[in-house]
Image (tube, rainbow, N blue to C red):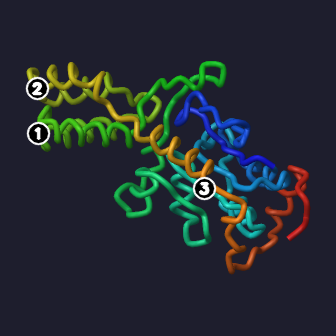
Amino acid sequence: MAMIVFAGPSLGAAPETDGRIVFRPPAACGDLLRACGERPEAIGLIDGYFETRPSVWHKEILWALRQGVAVYGAASMGALRAAECAAFGMIGLGQVFALYRDGVIDRDDEVAVQHGPPETNYVLLSEALVNIRATLARAVAAGVLEQGGADGLLACAADLFYKERTWEAACAAWQAQGAEPVRAAAFLQWLPQHKVDVKRADALQLVAALLAHKGVDRPPAPAFDFAHTQFWEILRRRVGASDSA
């Protein structure tokens, strides 16, 4: 079967892949387990639910890997799970994954966003903190902000609840804390044409990696014991998954 990618606001409109990739909405608990039953060549996890629905279990990823299905992660929930499951064979890609893997960031809300429904291509209503970090680094490199100013603005953004984390709200809090008005105005003028969307870049990197994936690249089943716990069996029955090992 074609490869399966779970994506939403990080990717936006799905690119054309000539049918080689089936794009599905952000993953929730049980979705990866269900997808394994279709025997895909690979699964890509980009976006996943975490508040309104139970999140993808780590154990679903282990199940896929145990059956020899390559699992890639990037950008958002995929980057988080890849950092947590890399030791078991999950393949992490992109800058966000590297930040989690290396311990530079560790908060879940670094990648969390408020967004619109699928009919709007998951239009973003808030800004991911990882995107704010990358944009502020670019502003410092361009001489638009000094490092101290960028650090102050980042701290203001990090203090906001993820659903309220917009550039407007972060900059308002920054100026309320005494940011130099001229410097703040220069940054806000520079921002629209130069802000960074590292999550989308990472999501596109995952799609490209899957398009380069070949069946012969399917990794051998990792050497770990998979425990069929009571809760796992309940989930397996709920999604109607096969009991094959």
* First in residue order: circle 3 vs circle 1: 3
Counting residues from the N terminus, which is met first, the one under dot 2 or under dot 3? 3
Judged from the image, the secondary structure of the residue bearing numbered disc 3 is strand
Image quadrant where residue 27 sits: top right
User: In the rendered image of this protein, does residue 230 appear above or below residue 92?
Assistant: below
Closer to viewer: mark 3 or mark 1: 3
Residue 184 picture location, percent across and down: 15, 24
In the image, what residue type sits under mark 3? Tyr
In three-dimensional space, the C-alpha distance between marks 1 and 2, rounded to whole angstroms, equals 9 Å
Residue at x 85%, y 63% (from the top left corner): 233
Q: Is residue 237 left or right of residue 223?
A: right
Secondary structure found at label 2: helix
Instruction: Tell me whether the residue at label 1 lies in contact with that at label 2, contact meaning CB atoms closer than 8 angstroms.
Output: yes
User: For mark 2, does the 10 Å Cα neighbourhood hold few (<14), some (14 to 19), or many (20 or more) residues?
Assistant: some
Q: Is residue 110 left or right of residue 31?
A: left
Choose the circle earlier in sequence order: 1 or 2: 1
- Which residue carries the number 3 mark? 72
The nearer-to-camera label among 2 and 3 is 3
Q: Residue type at mark 2: give it.
A: Arg
Whole-angstrom CA distance, mark 3 to mark 1, is 37 Å
Q: Quadrant of residue 99?
A: bottom left
Report the amino acid beneath label 1: Glu
146 or 156: which is nearer to us?
146
Q: Disc 1 on helix, strand or loop?
A: loop
The residue carrying pointer 3 sits among few (fewer than 14), some (14 to 19) or many (20 or more) residues within 10 Å by Cα, namely many
Q: Which residue is mark 2?
A: 183
Q: Looking at the rendering, in which quadrant would you find the C terminus?
A: bottom right
Question: What's the mark number on residue 146?
Answer: 1
Does residue 175 lie above or below 90 as drawn?
above
